[in-house]
Amino acid sequence: MLVFLGLLTSFLSFLYVTAPSIRKFFAGGVCGTNVQLPGKVVVITGANTGIGKETARELARRGARVYIACRDVLKGESAASEIRADTKNSQVLVRKLDLSDTKSIRAFAEGFRAEEKQLHILINNAGVMMCPYSKTADGFETHLGVNHLGHFLLTHLLLGQLKESAPARVVNLSSVVHHAGKIRFHDLQGEKSYNRGFAYCHSKLANVLFTRELAKRLQGTGVTTYAVHPGIVRSELVRHSFLLCLLWQLFSPFLKTAREGAQTSLHCALAEGLEPLSGKYFSDCKKTWVSPRARNNKTAERLWNVSCELLGIQWE
């Protein structure tokens, strides 16, 4: 027993001593483009913290006018103040957006359209993970409602400005866990059976399918779209799971920082020559493999139609 404990202690010590090198190996790709964005307008959801905040910081550094769209306006203002000071860009603005309430989404879009005539980059970054069963203000299961339907509606409402501003891009944050997801049309709201881990996976698959179908429908408009897996990142996303919070603390030396996690979002928003890859799924700043379910065109189209029906909208 003492020998085992000694070996375990030695192994853990070795692991943590070498953690910086290991984490550097798994840190993933880096957005290498030098594209500058003076005069460009960007909206990022959930940019008051984590990956979204670091994405906003870099786009502000490149001269864009950045809108931080978030539920917690106080946190948003704190993040915006920090970014303005860091980048010397005063055009970092905060607007309230609660993706769990379609009234809030519509109010945000209406206010944004009144302020801005153009929108060059929309980054659908916000999300929830591992929530206990609950429903949004409109009666949607929370993962589906926030992660998929909220961004589906937001993109729909801002599409006119995206088209007017072409070339423009839409970046949807998904996850590698979409491989475990399934679109359960017979129980989309999780009322028959619910597992909060799988509910998150299902919503991330919905993000990839939405990106795929959106790209098809936007052909010829000058607006392109990309799905992103940011990597396993130290962020607040795991706050609803005690176990994941514990694991994240334990393995934090090996996880990506928020800045590293933002690199693929930045790549898809900025990299030149990416237009032929519209609708594709990216990880570590390169196109990567998706699950067979994420390549199913019939499922993508059906999910699109069901989403429109649930939201009471009709795309042009």
Image (tube, rainbow, N blue to C red):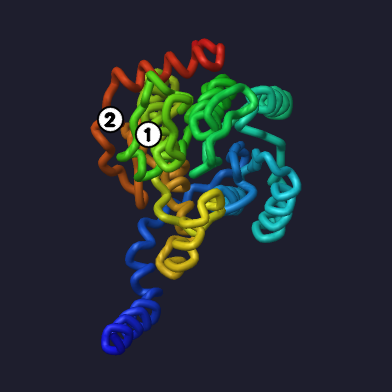
Q: Position of residue 29 (x, y in %)?
A: 36, 56
Q: Is residue 58 left or right of residue 182?
A: right
Of the residues shown, which amino acid type is indicated by label 1? Leu
Q: Secondary structure at mark 2?
A: helix
Quadrant for residue 118, please give it. Answer: top right
Of the residues shown, which amino acid type is indicated by label 2? Arg
* Residue 258 - label: none
* Residues under numbered marks 1 and 2 in contact, where contact means CB atoms less than 8 Å apart: yes
Residue of label 1: 205
- Which of disc 2 and disc 1 is earlier in sequence? 1
Q: Is residue 163 left or right of residue 227?
A: right
Residue at 72% in and 26% down:
111
Task: Give the residue at the far front of this rendering.
Answer: 1
Does residue 295 lie above or below 3 as drawn? above
Q: Position of residue 248 (x, y in %)?
A: 47, 61
Q: Secondary structure at mark 1?
A: helix
Residue at 70% in and 47% down:
76
Q: Position of residue 131 (x, y in %)?
A: 53, 41
Foreground pick, 288 / 7? 7
Label 1: how many residues lie within 10 Å, few (<14), some (14-19) or many (20+)? many
Foreground pick, 24 / 115? 24
Does residue 89 lie above or below 23 as drawn? above
Residue at 56% in and 12% down:
312
Residue of label 2: 293
Label 2: how many residues lie within 10 Å, few (<14), some (14-19) or many (20+)? many
Quadrant for residue 99, please give it. Answer: top right
Q: Position of residue 97 (x, y in %)?
A: 67, 34
The reply to whether residue 8 is visible in this rendering is: yes
Foreground pick, 314 / 182? 182
